[in-house]
Every structure is written in structure tokens, then in C-alpha cells.
Amino acid sequence: MCYTIEQIAEIIEAKHKLPLDRHNEILYLQTDSRKIFQPEQSIFIALKGERHNGHDYIEDVYQKGIKHFILSEQPPKIYQDANYLFVTNTLESLHKLATFHRKKNKLQVIAITGSNGKTIVKEWLYQLLKEDYKICKNPKSYNSQIGVPLSVWNISPSDDYGIFEAGISQPGEMSKLEKILLPEIGIFTNIGGAHAENFTDNLQKIEEKLKLFVNAKILIYCEDYRDIDRLVKKHLKNITGFTWSYQNKQSSLFIQSVTKTNNHSVITVVFNQNEFSFEIPFTDDASIENSIQCLSFLLLNNYAKETIIKRMYNLSTVEMRLEQKDAINGCTLINDSYNSDIDSLKIALDYVSNQNKYKKTTLILSDILQSGKNETVLYQNVSTLIKEKNITRLIGIGNAINRHKDVFSNGLFYRSTEDFLRTFNFSGLQNELILLKGARTFNFEKIAEKIQQKTHETVLEINLNAVVHNLNYYKSKLLPKTKLMVMVKAFGYGSGGAELANVLQFHKVDYLGVAYADEGIELRKSGISLPIMVMNPETEAYDSMIDYNLEPEIYSFRVLDLFLSKLEKISLGIKYPIHLKIDTGMHRLGFVENEIDKLITKILSATQLKVESIFSHLAAADDCNKDDFTRKQINLFKTLSEKIEKALNYKVCKHLLNSSGIIRFPEAQFNMVRLGIGLHGISNINEEKKYLQPVATLKTTISQLKKLYTGDNVGYGANTIVPNEKLIAIVPVGYADGYNRALSNGKGYMLIRGQKAPTIGNICMDMCMLDVTHISGVKEGDEVQVFGEKLPVSILADSLNTIPYEILSSVSHRVKRVYYQE
């Protein structure tokens, strides 16, 4: 559905400047300057957040072709061929547009909220209903104050159902989403600890979430969550509750039994006094609970048991992450072969377009199924998206995309996955980014298996969503004008320097910091354009640093003289940026107090240099017992840096705070801070830990299970003798992978099926042994967590009497990194 620019101005009650045709039609709402598509039919809404202001990107958006804007402040420049709609609050305008559009369409809306399972329930309902109805839903987990209205804007007049999840992070948000969605049917999945920091307790959080259903007719929920049940009955007295329970036989749906066997669960239920069973291809408790929420909806809508049983058995995994892996011939594979719809394709292409490492990109795309769009229009839209995102080559697989291959340029087309695998020349994939995007029925996992590089079974998974979460947490602690430098030294603390830097550049941090020039050079080769400070600039690397525009830390007169000598020889004709390091008490690198006058004299005479920043290091910012010492460092830094700046007679950036300092000494932000280990979800401050998310998970698999008998020995040295019969698991991770040998003989443990499996015997170079005698159902191929969310890296560090930095940076480069984004 289209709206004219004049209609939009009326809906949002805007003051407007409309030099263009008032009847220009708007199809798309855009809020992210980095993800612009189909600009001719789009309007850009300049949203303002705590750390980002969409008004700062008006020029960038205009250059990308958008000529229509919703603004709440005057832009730096007014373009005469653009339409401007001025409002008080741009987010409210986005909500008004979505609310108007929702009311104009008479579909039935199912709204889902809860602490966990929202996205799974939404996607499974879609899988269960799509054969019978046309459905609009949130792409991925677009469930926020921005994501929900953008999702609702996708509703078309032909849709029968809208299935939308809604999430909140603080009080007052859900009422706004309720006005947009106007749901008739609600599902409350469960209640847990997510976003607990912004609510008094779980009761307040439940009450806030229930505001989504104040005008709904029916609410599905599990009455075994006693607080939910009690508050539903207190606040939603006019709603019809469809409840299910493991305990109460009088509930609408009684769960009589759950039997788990061979990766399937058989669930027996009683509904309307009739007992029946169905099977799902999952055994975890969360999937069982989510399937029962979906079952409740099907029963409520009178689905036949035979249909329910068949469709439940065929439920498929909902993958909510884009995985990035090394692939053949120097390529990188981004695997999103789990669903295929136009919205998820946009998200995947946005992700791809912000990877800077490769000049070539290949999209392998299957038919897009059950889109509800006219086929010709659908593939024309796909073609437009591919052009806008500068995809080099398309490989289309399926009959439908073949029928419309004429709308694509530079494409190869195959009727089936088998046809592609049989005839495609895989040597033609060279040094490029490959996006795999397909409907599940096309079995693209066969293509992934063919393309991705065969790797060591031990992998380090890097959660890029957690990186962004932690980044935003620290940003929220900064004053609006405080800049942010992020340290990506030591291969990004083990997580991969270039990959992390790409995310940080995407999210517009101000500076990056590396230890050595070769780290900075690698970032430049990977397409990173942010300013980069090198903390240990070796003399022999000066030429390369200048070639790659890397900025050195100057910490001594020797280093200063050597760098000046290099600049004099090459005569750049510009003032080269440097960073002055002051020693305020850590007594590592840096100029001491009695050297500052001499330093000022030398800098003032060095016409080839510009001091970009002055900085120092805090030695004990995380130790409250040494706060007096830290404050002495702060005061000394303030005195010395201001003295230098005054002598220079121009403003320079000053930075002192590290991750702990950002939290504990906000008054010392100066005009930049440095974020390091905190980005990875690690903190020595107890009250801060709950707000951070772990970024890295080191995992492996069980290679072999072996039974040992009383008196048998285990491992090198034959010094470990088992006192009784044991079952051990051999896993392919050892000290060459970064698993310290000091964790031998029960000093360390890993997690298998959620249970502790202690080491037994000595850690070997490439493997180690775990005692799994007490773990029922364990089998070869089971996943083993070395560290991660459920086994924090800090526990390993404590066992070794060291710090998490050492554990993370010790993970060997031979351990493959897998990057994923939800």
C-alpha cells in the first residue's frame, strides 16, 4: 500500500515544506542510513537516541537517493529538491504511521510477549499456519519500539493474520506497542530475568507486559507460572484465558506426559476430555514449552488432530543468526540458509553490504516461498535489492527464480540444488564473500558443506550481537560529547581483530587501538578506515605505518626523535598525527612529570607533527581499595595534559579511562575513553557483570567415549590411576589450542549436557580427557563447552590464578573463529 507524502504529513500532523509533487508515493519507511534500499519510494525518519541522532546523516541519506524526510530539528543543509516534514518527536511519528496503517487493514493480529521464546513461537506459528492463510510477521526479532512499527508497515490488504512479537526493556513501552498492534489474540510465553535492571521486580515486569493485551479477546498462557496467572486474573478480568498446565487438570489444556527419545519428544495432552499425542523433533524443555503455546492456538482455532500431528512433527529449527565462516579458495561464507522471505533477505544483504574485506560478493538464492506477492513483482523487488547492495553475482536455484531470470543481470540459474552441485565449477569461487540464502526445502546445507572450509572440531564462536550490546552499554555511560576508542589489540582479545573492527566501524566508534603496526595494517587491508592508534610503534614499521595512515603512540624522546627523523626524510607535506603517552603512576611506558617541559619544547619545534591526543593508563581502576591512588593519577593527568594543550594552543583529545574506569570514575571522561575487555562482556566489578553479555564461546565435541576399569591409567605419564570403573570422553582441545596444561587432573572442567565434566589425566597438546561417568545419555559427537555463557571464562581464570585477558588471548589461531549475528 502506498501513501502520498501529503497523506503522511497529515497522519503525523507535520509542519511541512513540500517543494516536490505532493502526490509522490511512499512505500518504505527508512530509519537507518546504512541500510537504504529503493530510495525513490522511501521516506527517511531521523530518529534520536542516547548516542545516535539520525539528523547527523541527512546528507548521507540524500546522496543515496532519498528525497523525503521526517525531522524534529533543522538539518545542516536544506536541499531544494527534497520534501521535509517537521514534527516534535520522530519516533512518535513512526508510531503514528504504523498505527494508522494497522487500523486501515482488518486482519487478525496475534501478539506474543514474554521473557523467552517469542521469536520461536512466532516463527513456528507461521510454519503451522502458512498453508492456510496469508501472514505478515516481524522479520527476525524486530520486536522493539522501532522494530514493531516497521514490521506493521509491511501489512498488506490481502493478509489474513499478523503475527507480531513485542519486547520491552523498561516501563511505559508496552502501552505504545499495544496501540500500534491492537491484538485480538495474545500469547504470554513465560517470565524470566531479561531486562531485569529496569524493573523493580518480576511482578512489575509482568504487569507491564500484560498491557499488550488490555483490549485483546483471548490470552494463551501457562498457568503454572503462578505470578502470570495471578496478575492476568487481577488486571485482565474481561479477557478469555486459554490456559495450559502440567499440574492442573482443569486448565483448558492439560499436559499429561512428555517422553523424550532419539531427538524427538512425544507429548500427550488432554483437551475437551479427549486425550491425544503428538511428536516434535526436539527434546529441550524450551522447545516443548514453545510447541505447547502453538498447539494451544491450533486447538483454539479448531484444527483437526490429524493436521496438528502432521504439522507438529514437521516443525523445523528456527535459526536466528547469520554465521560467518572461512570457506574454500580464500572465500568467506555467510550462511543464512534457514528461511527465505523478502524481509530476511533485506537483513542478510544489509549485513553483507557492511563487510569490507572483499570486492566481490556472490548471493546463492533459492525460490522465495509463500511470500504472498505476485511472482513478477517479487523477483523484480529482489533484483532491485541485489543491485542496490552491489551484489556481484547471483546464483538462483529453483523453478520460480528461473522463470524470472531475465530481470537479473550477471546471474547463473539452476533448477535444483542437486543440479547446482553436479554442474557448478566451485573453483570459480575465489576470494569473495558468499551469502547462502534459501528456503529449507532446498537443502542448502549440502551447499554449505561443499563450500565451507573443513575445520578443526574446536571452534571459538563470537556473538556479534553481544559485542553490540556491550558497546551500547558502555556508550550509555558516556556524556554526549565523549568520544570512544576501542582496543582491538592481540587479535581482538582473541576474538578476531578485523571482524570486530568491522562491527565497531559499522557502529561508528571514533578510534581503534592496536598494539603493533602489523595489526593495524591487517585492519586497513580488511577495509577499516577508522583512525587507528598503534601503542607499540616499532622503528622498522614506520614506513608501513605512514603508508597505511596509522598513528603512533609517542612515549619517549627516543621514539619521538626516530619518528621525526623518518618524517623529515619523506617530506609528507602535512602534519602527521601522534598520541603522547604520559606516565601518571603505572610506571610502564610514558613521559614522566619532570620531562613535560622538554617534551613541550620539542613538540613545538616539530612542524611535521600534530598532537592528536594525550593519554595515560590507570593501574587499579577496578580496585576500590586503591581509589586514592587512582584519583592521584587522574589529577596528575589533568594537570600535565592541560599544560601540554595550553602550550600547543589548540585542542587535543585527552583519554585516561579504561573499561572499569568508565564505570567507576565517570567524572574523568575528559573527551575520550578507551574500551577494552568490557567489550567482551568481562568485568571485575560485580554490579556491572549482570549488564554485560559474554561474547566468546569456546566449544568442541566428544571424539570418543571410553570405559576404564579399576586400576587403569589415563594420559601422559601414566600417573593418574582410576580407583573405580569410569567413563571418559576424549575431546579435541589441548594446550596448543589455549587450554592450559595446569587445568589437568580435575583442576579444570567443561560442560556436557549442562553438567560439569572434570578433566582427568594430563592435558595433551591436541586433546584432553574428561570424566563423564555421572552424565547420563552422553554420546560421541555431543557438544562440549570449554567456556562461554554457562561457564564464564572468569572461572577458568580463577582456577589458573590469572585474569580473563590471558585466557581469551591464549586461544590459538588454529582454532577457527565463527562469527554470528542474531
Image (spheres, helix red, strand yellow):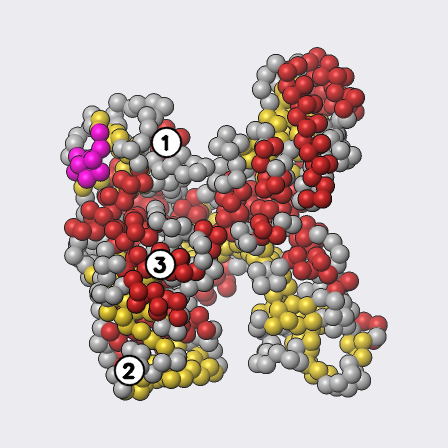
Query: Is residue 653 shown above or below 206?
Result: above
Q: Quadrant of residue 125?
A: bottom left
Q: Amino acid at mark 1?
A: His
* Residue 377: percent from left, percent from top: 23, 51
* Residue 457: percent from left, percent from top: 61, 65
Separation (CA) of disc 1 from disc 2:
55 Å
Mark 1 residue element: helix
- Sequence-wise, the earlier of marks 1 and 2 is 1
What are the residue bounds of the magenta stretch?
A: 6-15
Q: Quadrant of residue 132?
A: bottom left
Q: Which disc number belongs to residue 207?
A: 3
Mark 2 residue element: strand
Q: Residue at x 23, y 76 (%)?
A: 303
Q: Which disc number belongs to residue 271?
A: 2
The residue nearer to you, when weighing 754 against 612, is: 754
Query: Do the CB atoms of the residues marked 1 and 3 lie less than 8 Å apart?
Result: no
| Number of other residues with Cα within 10 Å of mark 3, as a class: few under 14, some 14 to 19, many 20 or more | some
Callout in the foreground (1, 3): 3
- Sequence-wise, the earlier of marks 3 and 2 is 3
Image position of 593 (left or right of 147) = right
Separation (CA) of disc 1 from disc 3:
35 Å
* Residue 139: percent from left, percent from top: 34, 55
Q: Which disc number belongs to residue 55?
A: 1
Q: Is residue 321 visible?
A: no
* Extreme residue toward the front, this view: 234
